[in-house]
Image: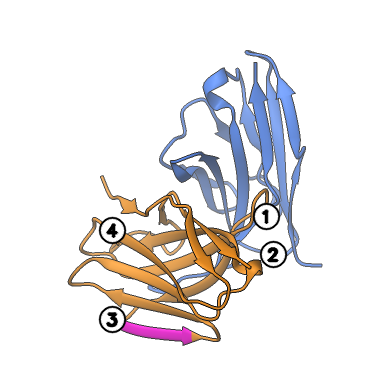
Amino acid sequence: EAQVTQNPRYLITVTGKKLTVTCSQNMNHEYMSWYRQDPGLGLRQIYYSMNVEVTDKGDVPEGYKVSRKEKRNFPLILESPSPNQTSLYFCASSPSGAAGGYNEQFFGPGTRLTVL
Amino acid sequence: QKEVEQNSGPLSVPEGAIASLNCTYSDRGSQSFFWYRQYSGKSPELIMFIYSNGDKEDGRFTAQLNKASQYVSLLIRDSQPSDSATYLCAVKGLGDSNYQLIWGAGTKLIIKP
């Protein structure tokens, strides 16, 4: 089944304890992205990757790191989580496409993170 | 700062009626417009996209775009309880990559049986 998977789905942690949220897609998509979703603010992009070893900041990158060593995986790393990073996180992927067009983004199931 | 605005709702509509969801955007150069549906506790999924002024129909859904007014809407005909969800409007601007979107905060729609 074509899908984007994220782990863990739920995580409660404490301030300063490093954590990684994994994201994997089995659709051979070149593009992958991380979003956070907060009430009243919609989806905000954290980081995105156009291809292996190519990553770039989104709108809210502070406090996050990513890596793209393989096409299928795009982990999100919080080196020192803080309570303001409590949020619902989504990973998304999209196939490559012709310039000027748009490719549907496929979302993972989400990771609900609470930082105490 | 590019913005996409949606009424947060909730918008309550009787079953069988037409639900009308609205979205305005600030970047006059925006080119592509998308409606995603998000059920409570689930991830967003694409319903429709529209590039040109006018209407685009897909089953019970119609997207309407008015670039002069910087306004895009989604109509849902014969609303069903299963349409109850949050509807996210997303916009791709001129010059933005094919993958980067500006998202509205969403409108919560409730279809009452």
Label of residue B110 in the image: none
Q: Mark 3, residues whose alpha carbon is within 10 Å: few (<14), some, or many (≥20)?
A: some
Residue B44 in view, yes or no: yes
* Amino acid type assigned to the residue bearing label 2 in the image: Asn
Based on the picture, tell me whether residue B56 belongs to the magenta stretch.
Answer: yes
User: Along the horizontal axis of the image, is A77 left or right of B18?
Assistant: right
Mark 3 vs mark 2, CA separation in Å: 33 Å
Label of residue A28 in the image: 2
- Which element is circle 4 on? strand
Residue at screen point 34% across, 59% down? B96
Based on the picture, tell me whether residue B102 belongs to the magenta stretch.
Answer: no
Residue at mark 3: chain: B
Label of residue B25 in the image: 4
Residue at screen point 56% across, 68% down? B46
Mark 1 vs mark 2, CA separation in Å: 7 Å
- Which element is circle 2 on? loop
